[in-house]
Image (cartoon, helix red, strand yellow):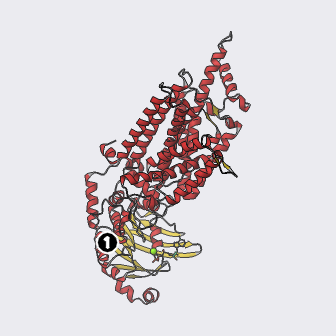
Amino acid sequence: MSTLLEVSGVSVTFDGFRAINNLSFRIGEAELRAVIGPNGAGKTTFMDIVTGKTRPDEGRVLWGDKSQSLLKMSEARIAQAGIGRKFQKPTVFEDQTVQENLLMALKKPRSWLSVLGYRPVASDLARVEELAAEIGLVEALSRKSGELSHGQKQWLEIGMLLAQEPRLLLVDEPAAGMTPTEREHTTDILVRAAQTRAVVVVEHDMEFVRRLNCKVTVLHEGAVLAEGSLDHVTANQDVIDVYLGR
Amino acid sequence: MNRSFVAKNPSVLIFLACLAVFTLVVTILSEGFGIGVVSTSFVKTLGKTLCLCLIAVAMDLIWGFVGILSLGHFAFFGLGGYMIGMWLMYERTRLIVVESLSQSDIPPTAAEVTDAIGNQIFGVVGASEFPLIWVFADSLVLQLALVVLVPGLLALVFGWLAFRSRVTGVYLSILTQAMTLALALYLFQNDSGLRGNNGLSGLQNLPGVTASQDQVSLWFLWASAAALGAGYVLAAWLVWGKFGSVIRGIRDNEARVRFLGYSVESYKLAVFTLTACIAAIAGALYYPQAGIINPAEVAPIASIYLAVWVAIGGRGRLYGAVIGAAFVSLLSTWFTGGQAPDIPLGFYTIKWVDWWLVLLGVSFVLVTLFAPKGIGGLFDLITARRSPDRHGADLGPDDGALREQEAGR
Ligand SMILES: Nc1ncnc2c1ncn2[C@@H]1O[C@H](COP(=O)(O)OP(=O)(O)OP(=O)(O)O)[C@@H](O)[C@H]1O
Ligand SMILES: [Mg+2]
């Protein structure tokens, strides 16, 4: 499998505290990967680095077939290159309707001049409908997204992520605040998405991770502690000590 | 502009209709028309108020829709005024000089005329040479171009530096205050080339126009109304489509917009520069009606008033900004013009000239605390626009984000 994203030897220090410590990680095209680890392990910080929000002190982050470095690129450029991100706390544009949120995320030219002249054509609206159906928000299309429930916001954000048509999806705790049925639905969406693109899911819930049925990376103190199938890593003594045993 | 824009924004048509009716009624009642119920000086006040409404629309675009609390837009307004003022003053002085020199036996050379104009204009600051910045002052077309080019370029450079370094929130507001303060201090200098604290005067007299001020005041009223109408439609169109979606997104959560792949900085820069140009056009129409412009006009406090007007009118809705600017500035004229009756309390007499600012400040605080939708919120009672049912905090994490109470369903 060809490598889509390769992170090697990356370290980040916040006020003397090493949040990421010589981390290396790679993911291939159309791969589903779960990342687990105790609070403060650096999972979110890892996503911050890949998406350009946080600049690492050292290390390399290479992207795509041409092994382009992401470290010099702005957040917007990285997103345009094909990396989409869902935040830990659901962040949708609360003052705008579900439809407006999805339209904004739809893969279209992003420059202000082209946006100024943009009017949604029938195919765009159809695509939005389709996405809304997938995330169960067809009825809510014209509602302000601020009024949605916590779980619905999570879904809307996942829908926006799919609308971007990224090659890599970084999903931070997608199931937080969802009911068991909602969780199941979320797993389905992510597994389906991973058929055509790479997906990295950060999640604390072991049941959820088990259902994803994929390779698991365990982070601890900013570095990879173990990697492999869920059964393999949960049998690892280090993992039991720092994460599962508590 | 397509049909659905008008269909989806009926408030634009209502606004244009109100503006047209207002202009027509004032025109008919004016001295210039013959009825004379409305004095020429009041026509000028109303015309100036329309210009203030226009800059308030610009302020609402940048603050209410992009979330950037700029406290420097009066700098652009003032610069626009200076640019048109230079031509007005040059050309009128030239006509007077040519007229007076033509009395002499020998016809004056071009150099003599220029020297005489320079003496007339710059005598007050002890100079007579034309500073470099006046090179285009003899050309109306070029000075009109400079009305938008100079403030536009200043906004472009300032915005590029500020947005690129990701300065946001209070720090950006302070930076814009610093910019307008720096400009005011520069203009106050006698060798600024713009007559120091004397400023430019006599701007109400249009060179070569023999019509009375009764007429001229009407022309400016019409021009100001047309500019306000055009500016309003442009702003409404900008905030309507996907562009509006993106800038409102930037207001509430700019990091999220970035991760969607939009270059937040270029959007901010585009709107900041555009609003600076709108402010400059408003200023270029305002000062010929005011008759005089001096550096005090671009003092930092002026830009703060602008934010207060928009807040009192209700930000994030364009008509709110217009209402706020018109209401507060007219009220301010009334209070500070000495027309408001003093209130004798026995032990102390409240003189409004002194106390108006206190009243304004208190109203600002009260509106911010208890009626975040401002005066514009009253319209929600008619249109039954309800607040969203979210039981959450503000609509976004950013400083400029709409507060929950400001939003509508
Ligand atoms: N901007 C920052 N400044 C200072 N410290 C930070 C910053 N961002 C993260 N940290 C610290 O880095 C460490 C890793 O944080 P991170 O958010 O990546 O953890 P996480 O694995 O996502 O945890 P959780 O499971 O709680 O979401 C934490 O100790 C956190 O306090
Ligand atoms: Mg986290």
Q: Nearer the viewer, residue A189 or B355?
A: B355
Relative to B9, does residue A147 appear above or below in the rendering? Answer: below
Q: Residue furthest right?
A: B126
Task: Inspect the image, locate mark 1, and give the three-letter code of the amino acid beneath it.
Answer: Leu
* Residue at screen point 66% across, 15% down: B101
| Image quadrant occupied by the N terminus of chain B | top left
Q: Quadrant of residue B201?
A: top right
Residue A244 x/y as whole percent: 42, 87
Is A239 on the left or on the right of B200, as rendered? left
Q: Whole-percent x and y of residue B217? A: 52, 29
Determine crowd level at label 1: few under 14, some 14-19, many 20+ residues with C-alpha closer than 10 A. Answer: many
Label count reads 1
Q: Nearer the viewer, residue B257 or A37?
A: B257
The x and y percentages for residue A214 are: 33, 78
Classify the position of ligand 2 by quadrant: top left, top right, bottom left or bottom right.
bottom left
Please state, as top left, top right, bottom left or bottom right, where the C terminus of chain B lies in the image: bottom left
Residue that label 1 marks: A190
Query: For this rendering, which residue is in front, A42 or B33?
Result: B33
- Left or right? Give the position of B383 relative to B100: left
The answer to whether residue B74 is above or below residue A72 is above
Query: A161 or B34: which is nearer to us?
Result: B34
Q: Secondary structure at mark 1?
A: helix
